[in-house]
């Protein structure tokens, strides 16, 4: 039977370390978040980040833009934040409305203020070992995996994801831990066989209950990044948690697993940028 990886507990520990650092170094970090439109899930995420900032002593600046805003107007907002010396870190809440080009907007953020670490220049520098600034989501995933206290050396990891922004930095972090990592699209014909061999399975597919008990290796570490709404009420992951729980070694719940730790790493990176 699996042990649940408690993301809330890990996030609380990280927050305490951040509070101490802010107080000890007398920092005044400032985070600006840009939210376009009125997507309910995005609003929830922004409010969680706002609450977390207030808990640790980070000044939160919220820019709520209408859904019909033009791309040029969004870029003007980002340019304003780039030039605002008070702002240490900028985050654009994703996903953006379909009429906006996400890549262009992310690239418009000053790399020195890109708190998510999604700017192509930041990802390139990190992968090529020219920067120690780690994107928050991959770093949070590593914290969750390390919390299991398992010996990770020479373990087999499988990342199910389509997004290079996630899997490139994550694969490098796993490689640094001497974990042998494979990246696979969820549509790959050999997916089930590959999943069954993985000691660590990380999934960001975006399909509820996509990973079933017969797909996983006995005792595997399961990190579920998926956030899927069903019946307009319930949020579930990519993994059939109830069925997989009896077979896995460690597993993150949804909600309460990856989410809280990702928010904590956002705070961590904001403080890091403030010190720069």
Image: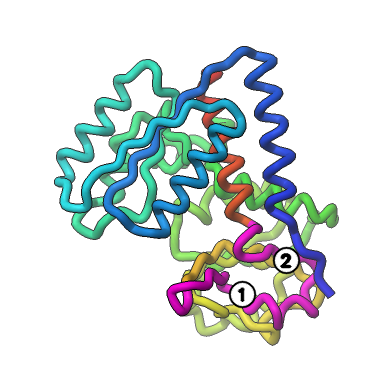
Question: Which quadrant of the figure contains the N terminus?
Answer: bottom right
Q: Is residue 101 left or right of residue 6?
A: left
Tell me where the magenta segment starts and ends, as one range: 230-257
Tell me the residue that label 1 is attached to: 239
Above or below for 239 versus 275: below
Can the viewer see residue 173 in this picture?
yes
Q: Looking at the image, tell me whether mark 1 or mark 2 is earlier in sequence order.
A: 1
Disc 1 is placed on an element classified as: loop
Residue at image position (69%, 59%) is: 180
What residue do we see at 55% from left, 32% from top? 54
- 101, above or below 248, in the image: above
> Looking at the image, which residue is at 57% across and 26% down?
57
Q: Disc 1 vs disc 2: Cβ atoms closer than 8 Å?
A: yes
Residue at left offset 56%, top offset 73%: 238
Residue 116 is a magenta residue? no
Circle on res. 251:
2
The reply to whether residue 130 is in sight is no
């Amino acid at each position: 039977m699996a042990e649940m990886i408690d993301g809330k507990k890990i996030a609380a520990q990280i927050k305490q370390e951040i509070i101490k650092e802010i107080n000890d170094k007398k920092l005044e970090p400032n985070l600006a978040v840009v939210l376009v439109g009125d997507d309910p899930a995005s609003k929830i995420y922004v409010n969680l980040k706002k609450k977390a900032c207030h808990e640790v002593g980070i000044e939160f600046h919220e820019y709520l833009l209408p859904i019909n805003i033009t791309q040029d107007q969004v870029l003007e907002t980002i340019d304003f934040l780039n030039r605002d010396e008070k702002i240490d870190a900028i985050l654009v809440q994703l996903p953006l409305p379909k009429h906006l080009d996400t890549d262009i907007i992310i690239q418009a953020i000053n790399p020195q203020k890109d708190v998510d670490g999604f700017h192509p220049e930041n990802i390139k520098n990190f992968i090529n070992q020219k920067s120690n600034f780690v994107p928050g989501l991959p770093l949070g995933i590593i914290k969750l995996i390390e919390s299991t206290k398992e010996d990770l050396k020479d373990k087999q990891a499988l990342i199910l994801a389509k997004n290079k922004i996630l899997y490139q930095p994550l694969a490098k972090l796993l490689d640094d831990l001497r974990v042998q990592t494979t990246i696979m699209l969820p549509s790959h014909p050999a997916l089930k066989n590959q999943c069954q061999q993985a000691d660590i399975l990380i999934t960001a597919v975006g399909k509820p209950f996509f990973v079933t008990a017969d797909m996983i290796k006995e005792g595997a570490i399961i990190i579920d990044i998926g956030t899927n709404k069903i019946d307009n009420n319930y949020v579930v992951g990519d993994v059939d948690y109830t069925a997989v729980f009896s077979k896995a070694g460690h597993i993150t719940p949804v909600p309460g697993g990856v989410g809280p730790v990702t928010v904590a790493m956002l705070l961590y990176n904001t403080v890091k940028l403030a010190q720069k």
